[in-house]
Every structure is written in C-alpha cells, then in structure tokens.
Image (spheres, rainbow, N blue to C red):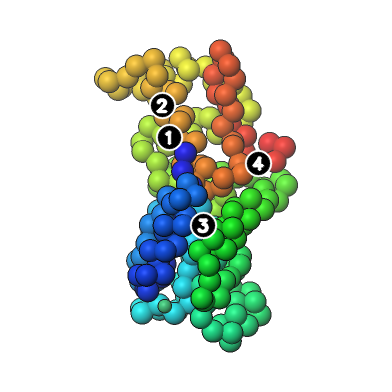
Amino acid sequence: MQTHILIIEDESPIAEVLAYALKSEGYATHCCTLGGEGLAQLRSGHYALAILDVGLPDMSGFAVCREARTFTDLPILFLTARSDEVDRIVGLEIGADDYVTKPFSPREVVARVRVILRRRVPVAVNATWFEVNEASARIRFCGTNLELTRYEFLLLKMLLAHTGRIYAREVLMEAIWCDALDTSDRTVDTHIKTLRAKLKAVREDLDPIVTHRGMGYSVVNGVGQ
Ligand code: CA
C-alpha cells in the first residue's frame, strides 16, 4: 500500500527531482504547479503529506497552507528560497510541520518526509478518529474527508455504528450487499482492503480496522475506544 505525497511546486525541475527521489523510496507522488490546483487535490483526502513551495504563481504557499488548514490537518513541508520566508514559517503559526531551504538535497527532503510521517502521534485521547455525516454520505477520518465508494461508505458506517463489535462477513454481506448482483466470497475482504488503503493514505500510523480471524471485522474509533 503506497503513501501518497502531493508536491505543489511551480519549478518543474525541482518537482521532478523530488518526485523521483520519493518514488525511489516507495512513495506515490502527484505534482501541481498552482496553489488552487493543489488545494483541490488536498480536498480529495488522498494524500498523507504535502510538500509546498512558498512562491507559487497564483497564490502564496502561506495562503495555500492557511486554506488547507480549514479542512485538513495533514502534514505540510514547506520549500523556501529565502530566509525571511523561513522566519514567517517558524514565527507565524500557519500550521507547517517542517521546512527545507533551497537548494536542498532530495535525499534530505525524503528523510524529512519519513520523520514527519513517523512522528505523527494519534489525535488527543478521548477524541474520535471518525465522523460520519449521514446527510452528505461522507466520513471524515482524523480531520480529512475520505473519498469512498457507496459500498465502502456503507461498510465503514456499519462498523462504526458499534465500535469494537465484531461483524461477521455474512452479516456485513447481507446488510450491505443485499441488492448487489456481482458479489463473491471475497467481496467484504476486498472492500476492507481498499478501505484500509484509504485510511493509511491519511494516517500511516493508525490501523483502525481490526481483523478477527475466522470471525470478522471490527473498528477502533480513537485511543481507548
Ligand atoms: Ca516557486
């Protein structure tokens, strides 16, 4: 399962060298040259981390970060060319996780990315990881909207209805795929697999779906939940 990194950088040689270094370490990458485009990508909830250049053609990286913080808490690593920008990143609390100054070595950036993804600690005790919005058929996970298919949504919603309860495959099958024609013995398992990948893309360090061998699945919704 790959971790997706978004690179928002208008200088394509820099973006390419970063994408290459990240890919060689097993990360999947996507590059944008505009801040607006980057924000649209971030709203997909597909990424575990964003690398963000301060100087972009359409808006500043600071503005992108501020906007992103209204809907996601994914880690943001700034790329900056100037020391006065570093002062702003460090001094103002705009929600950056780290920064590197240009010119940088791609290996250094990859190392930073690794550290940031590893040090992400679970959200506060008592806080729940998931928020189900029935009306919009959406589920947020650690502050990020998940892009789910209809069946993935129904499956996760059902598991979340009773946190910790073990649901047998047959029970899930009957409740969720009752109207589906093309199902198999593996239907539940394959959907659990894609769900896990989507959760992992948001938080590499959390694994909320629990497999109970020979019994079924349950979900954990936060520390001690
Ligand atoms: Ca730039």
In this rendering, would 208 be left or right of 33? right
Q: Amino acid at mark 3?
A: Leu
Label 1: which residue? 194
Label 3: which residue? 49
Q: Vertical placement of 207 versus 92: above or below? A: above
Assign a secondary structure to mark 2. helix
Q: Are marks 3 and 2 in contact (CB under 8 Å)?
A: no
The residue closer to the viewer here, 24 or 71, is 24
Label number found at residue 190? 2
Camera-side mark, 3 or 1: 3
Of the two numbered discs 3 and 2 on the same chain, state the one appearing first in sequence.
3
Residue 82, given in percent of the width and then of the height, sits at 54, 84
Camera-side mark, 4 or 3: 3
Camera-side mark, 2 or 4: 2
Camera-side mark, 1 or 4: 1
In this rendering, would 186 be left or right of 169? left
Taking the image as drawn, is residue 210 in sight? Answer: yes
Residue at x-position 51% and y-position 81% = 81
Label 4: which residue? 222
Of the two numbered discs 4 and 3 on the same chain, state the one appearing first in sequence.
3
Q: Are marks 2 and 4 in contact (CB under 8 Å)?
A: no
**Callout 3 crowding tier (Cα within 10 Å): few <14, some 14–19, many ≥20:** many
Q: Amino acid at mark 4?
A: Gly
Quadrant hosting residue 135: top left
